[in-house]
């Protein structure tokens, strides 16, 4: 039984020799351990049925090759493994993690309380290793199990290295929706955010949080996750980002049963070919489908797709910024033309804020956030009102309107606080 095999590991495996070759006698083994060549000591460290005290003795061997063999050996007693967890050689620690990973699924079985405590102690040591490579192996080994401490998993999920955090964020059953929301709120991006987006059966609040970060790669993974529950709130945010990111168009269109309101938004920027797919997958009524097709034809007739707006909104924004022409008039004109991608890039350049911060402020559904973003970019309240109505998606009753003489109705310190809040 697994429990008995694991208890053998605590004290050293006895009576089993998986390694080819006959184990030397006790006296010969003692002599090899003390005075044998590196090759002889490596061979000795590979015997699973060697006396536990000799295996423990080899943890202090000068040759890292010997200690690596020891770390791989299923017969090495767990007390010796605890010593190896602090070994200075990276290879030793990596091999040790892989070995423990093979036994983790059986932790907690009846009669293995001591093993569980010692094995968890080793995992906790290695999960805090100074090298990302070691921590990454820990994460990979325990990403699917549910019988390790939640605090251990939460710590790995917050690791600064994506190769450590990503496997836990994508797979660990010990992370709940609130854990994921907290981690995203603390600041998450790149491969780690993409890992959350790929998580099976992703709950709607978490999908909203992923979309709210405005990360194109994470949104792409989210749209490709058939099991993710993506509600209208997230779809609204995604549609805003996708308007200026052609690589997201097909992914949006290929989501099943898109709400009609969202279908109308998507139809405002996708190609005619993708519109047909969108109509078919979302079961759009015939009358509405005809209306959407007419609108697309009108856009084509107006040449709204490329020549008028241009193929690269970021390049256009940077060119105007370089020549000092990126101002309120340029942003307002882009808002009226529904050139959302240009507007986003213009706000990034004018405000000096990170793209992620601008995306958060635009996607927050907050009149104050949109207004503070315009203020930070040196734009006036007229632009702030237009931004609230368009990309900000602010309801008319909650919009912020100009103060006396068209000035910002909020004091500078309050506007600055909103900028700091979304930058945190």
Image (cartoon, rainbow, N blue to C red):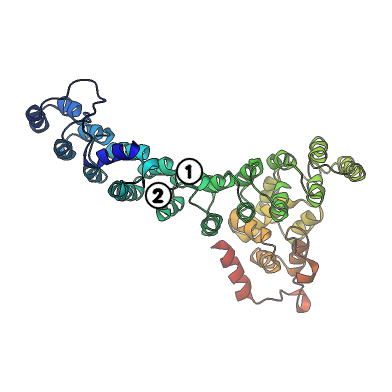
Marker disc for residue 182: none
Q: Is residue 237 visible?
A: yes
* Circle nearer the viewer, 1 or 2: 2
In this rendered view, identify the residue nearer to me: 217 or 82.
82
Between 49 and 305, the one nearer to me in the picture:
49
User: Upstream in the sequence, badge 1 or badge 2?
Assistant: 2
Rendered view: 397 above or below 252: below
Left/right placement of residue 284 relative to residue 341 reads: right
Residue plotted at (60% across, 66% down): 419
The picture places residue 199, in percent across and down from the top left corner, at 57, 45
Residue 102 at what x, y percent from top left? 36, 37
- Is residue 159 visible in the rendered image? The answer is no
Q: In which quarter of the image is residue 181?
A: bottom right
Count neighbours of disc 2 (C-alpha within 10 A) and say few if under 14, some if 14 to 19, many if 20 or more.
many
**Horizontally, is 223 left or right of 295 in the view?**
left
Return the residue at label 1: 167
Q: Quadrant of the N terminus?
A: top left
Q: Name the residue under label 2.
A: 148
Describe residue 181's horizontal placement relative to residue 124 as left or right.
right
In the image, is residue 424 above or below residue 16? below
Please provide percent x and percent y for residue 416.
Answer: 60, 70
| Secondary element at image label 2 | loop
Taking the view exactly as shown, the residue that stands out farthest to the bottom is 404
Q: Is mark 1 on a helix, strand or loop?
A: helix
Residue lying at 65% horizontally and 41% vertically, measured from the top left: 226
């Amino acid at each position: 039984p697994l429990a008995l095999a694991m208890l053998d590991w605590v004290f050293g495996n006895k009576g089993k020799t998986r390694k080819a070759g006959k184990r030397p006698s006790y006296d010969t083994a003692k002599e090899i351990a003390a005075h044998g060549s590196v090759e002889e000591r490596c061979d000795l460290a590979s015997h699973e049925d060697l006396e536990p005290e000799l295996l423990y003795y080899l943890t202090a061997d000068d040759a890292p090759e010997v200690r690596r063999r020891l770390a791989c050996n299923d017969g090495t007693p767990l007390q010796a493994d605890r010593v190896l967890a602090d070994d200075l050689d990276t290879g030793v620690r990596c091999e040790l993690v892989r070995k423990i990973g093979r036994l983790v699924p059986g932790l907690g079985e009846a009669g293995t309380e001591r093993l569980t405590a010692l094995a968890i102690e080793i995992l906790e040591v290695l999960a805090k290793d100074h090298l990302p490579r070691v921590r990454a192996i820990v994460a990979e080994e325990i990403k699917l199990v549910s019988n390790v401490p939640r605090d251990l998993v939460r710590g790995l999920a917050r690791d600064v290295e994506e190769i450590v955090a990503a496997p836990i964020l994508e797979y660990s059953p010990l992370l709940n929706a609130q854990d994921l929301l907290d981690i995203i709120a603390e600041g998450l991006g790149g491969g780690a955010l993409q890992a959350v987006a790929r998580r099976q059966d992703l709950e709607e609040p978490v999908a909203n949080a992923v979309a709210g970060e405005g990360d194109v790669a994470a949104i792409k993974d989210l749209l490709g996750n058939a099991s993710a529950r993506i509600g209208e709130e997230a779809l609204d945010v995604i549609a805003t980002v996708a308007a200026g990111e052609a690589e997201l168009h097909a992914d949006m269109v290929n989501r099943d049963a898109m709400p009609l309101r969202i279908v109308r938004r998507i139809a405002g920027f996708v190609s005619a070919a993708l519109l047909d797919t969108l109509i078919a997958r979302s079961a759009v009524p015939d009358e509405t489908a005809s209306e959407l097709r007419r609108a697309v034809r009108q856009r084509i007739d107006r040449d709204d797709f490329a020549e008028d707006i241009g193929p690269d909104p970021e390049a256009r924004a940077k060119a105007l910024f370089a020549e000092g022409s990126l101002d309120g008039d340029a942003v307002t004109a882009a808002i009226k033309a529904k050139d959302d991608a240009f507007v986003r890039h213009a706000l990034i350049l004018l405000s000096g804020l990170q793209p992620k911060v601008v995306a958060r402020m635009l996607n927050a559904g907050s009149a104050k956030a949109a207004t503070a973003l315009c203020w930070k970019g040196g734009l006036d309240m007229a632009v702030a009102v237009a931004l609230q109505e368009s990309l900000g998606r602010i309801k008319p009753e909650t919009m912020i309107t100009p103060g006396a003489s068209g000035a910002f109705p909020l004091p500078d310190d309050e506007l600055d606080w909103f900028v700091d809040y979304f930058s945190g």
